[in-house]
Amino acid sequence: MSQRGQYRGNRGSNRGGRGGRGNFDGNKGSISIERPKKENILDLGKYMDKKISVKVSGVVGVLKGYDALMNLVLDDVEESMHDEENKTTTRSLGLVVVRGTLLVLISPVDGSEEIANPFVQTEE
């Protein structure tokens, strides 16, 4: 019976490191890892105080602010709505906060124009 502990691989040995405390180095959490600051995907700073078109449901307004989550603050907002007969009605909303999760498209109103889709194949 005295050899039984040796045969089973010395159960009391230090097999798992330091008793389940993994990566313990004695500094009590004083190690700080420097990570690079995440940058925004889109730099909206160049559109501040300029009229932009935001594809949520046809909203156009002047960009007054934004954050890292792409939430927008728009002023002088006009919403265009389309009905079943393709009639467009516009209403003024004033100052609006748009959640970033609802954004589909952001484009400047000045200096942009719509072009034909170059990927659509025309039938001959």
Image (tube, rainbow, N blue to C red):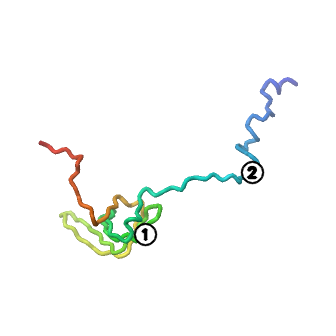
Quadrant position of residue 43: bottom left
Quadrant position of residue 99: bottom left
Quadrant position of residue 21: top right
Q: Residues within 10 Å of mark 1 (few under 14, many from 20)?
A: some
Q: Earlier in the sequence, mark 2 or mark 1?
A: 2
Can you name the residue that lies furthest to the right here? Answer: 2
Give the amino acid type for the residue marked by disc 2 in the picture.
Answer: Asn
Which residue corresponds to the image point at 36% horizontal and 74% vertical from the top-left?
75
Measuring from the top left, give residue 3's x and y in whole percent: 85, 23
Q: Secondary structure at mark 2?
A: loop
Which residue corresponds to the image point at 31% horizontal and 64% vertical from the top-left?
108
Q: Secondary structure at mark 1?
A: strand
Q: How many marks?
A: 2
Give the amino acid type for the residue marked by disc 1 in the picture.
Answer: Gly
Which residue matches tag 1? 65
Measuring from the top left, give residue 7's x and y in whole percent: 80, 23
Measuring from the top left, give residue 91's x and y in whole percent: 28, 74
- As measured in the structure, the alpha-carbon distance from the residue carrying label 2 to the one carrying label 1 is 43 Å
